[in-house]
Amino acid sequence: RAKADGRRAYRFYTADMTERARERLEIETALRRALAEHELRLVFQPQIDLRSGRLMGAEVLVRWLHPTAGLLLPGRFIAVAESTGQIEQIGGWVLEEACRDLKRWERAGFGGIRLGVNVSGRQVLHGNLVETVQGALERSGCRPESLEIEITEGFLIRGPDTSRSILERIRDMGVGIAIDDFGTGYSSLSYLKQFPISRIKIDRAFVRDISLDVNDQAIVRAIIALGRSLGLKVIAEGVETAEQLALLTECGCNEAQGYLFSEPLTASVFLDYWNRQARPL
Ligand code: C2E
Ligand code: MG
Ligand code: MG
Ligand code: MG
């Protein structure tokens, strides 16, 4: 009986594995087409200065306009792209496109903000990130100071020496470096001074319950204090309520992004948002 159960469990296990492998292959193939057929799009989420209420920048997030499945979020395809290596091509495209948009806006009279671009650890460790960033800046004519790359701490730890030297070269160009989802990884605090970081992004997991959970509030306070004493800017992710905003402001957090201000917007809607912000009616 135990044997039969075991066999059945094994069969389910392999069926599940096969299903996952099939789905992965499907995404990989479809992504190759997506890149060739230009199905990827960028959206922009406003980042707001908490003291002045001004728009300081935006995080660039990728979307996949799939011909039959509709609009796909990165959660559906970034992990696959990371494991197949396609993230290097996708990431390169995102950087190029983001810089081109920023320059186009600047020419249209919308200047003075920065764009934050998510970069996968695989781009840092295996791609030519330095050349990719340099190329995107040169071809677009963007100022390096208006670009920031966002990277999660987990990746830095996998190849600390390689990542440090690559990030230093990027920092030396004048490009900002933000640690994304801060607090969720292996968070060795010493990394904050070992790497050339300019900004900490507090993960929304800590922001979510900040007004209910005293521990989360203590963690957020500590991150902000730490950032300040190290001379880093701190931005909170996933701010959804006025209560969260009030607490973050009181703690001395520099900036915030989240649905309270705006969801990620297409370029033209983002420009409308910016316009309204700059010239309130
Ligand atoms: P992330 O970099 O931490 O991005 C923040 C995510 O939180 C985004 O999800 C954003 O839409 C969502 N978000 C923003 N405000 C709120 C809020 O108030 N509440 C809640 N619940 N969520 C909010 P999205 O766009 O689905 O992206 C998910 C992740 O995919 C990103 O997390 C990032 O790690 C990755 N990603 C997105 N674009 C790229 C890219 O171009 N390259 C790479 N390598 N990764 C990307
Ligand atoms: Mg990010
Ligand atoms: Mg994040
Ligand atoms: Mg994330």
Image (spheres, grey):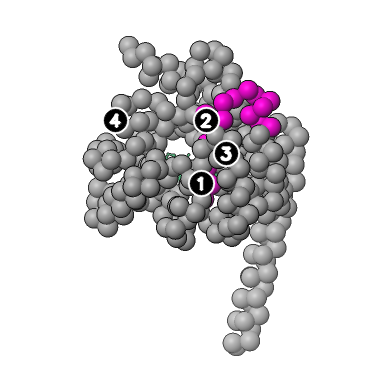
Q: Residue at x 47, y 22 (%)?
A: 112
Marks 2/4: CA distance? Answer: 21 Å
The crowding category of the residue bearing disc 3, from other C-alpha atoms within 10 Å (few below 14, some 14 to 19, many at least 20), is few
Question: Of the residues under marks 1 and 3, which one precedes in the sequence?
Answer: 3
Please determine whether, in this image, residue 239 is positioned above or below residue 271. Answer: below
Look at the numbered disc 1 and say if its residue's Cβ is closer than 8 Å to ligand 2. Answer: no
Q: Which residue is mark 3?
A: 172
Tag 4–tag 3 contact (CB < 8 Å): no
Mark 2 residue crowding within 10 angstroms, few (<14) / some (14–19) / many (20+): some
| Nearer-N-terminus badge (4/3) | 4
Counting labels gives: 4
Determine which residue is flagged by label 2: 145
Q: Residue at 64% of width from left, 64% of height from top?
A: 16
- Please, what secondary structure does the residue beneath circle 1 have? loop
Residue 63 point in image, percent of width and height: 58, 36
Query: The residue under label 2 is which amino acid type?
Result: Glu
In this orientation, which residue lies closer to the viewer: 167 or 270?
A: 167
Q: Amino acid at mark 4?
A: Arg
Residue highlighted by disc 4? 51
Which circle's residue, 3 or 2, is located before the other in the chain? 2
Circle 4 Cα neighbour tier, 10 Å, few/some/many (<14 / 14–19 / ≥20): few
Q: How far apart are the two marked residues, 4 and 1, measured between alpha carbons?
A: 26 Å
The residue range painted magenta reads: 135-152
| Mark 4 or 3: the one toward you | 3
Image disc number at residue 196: 1
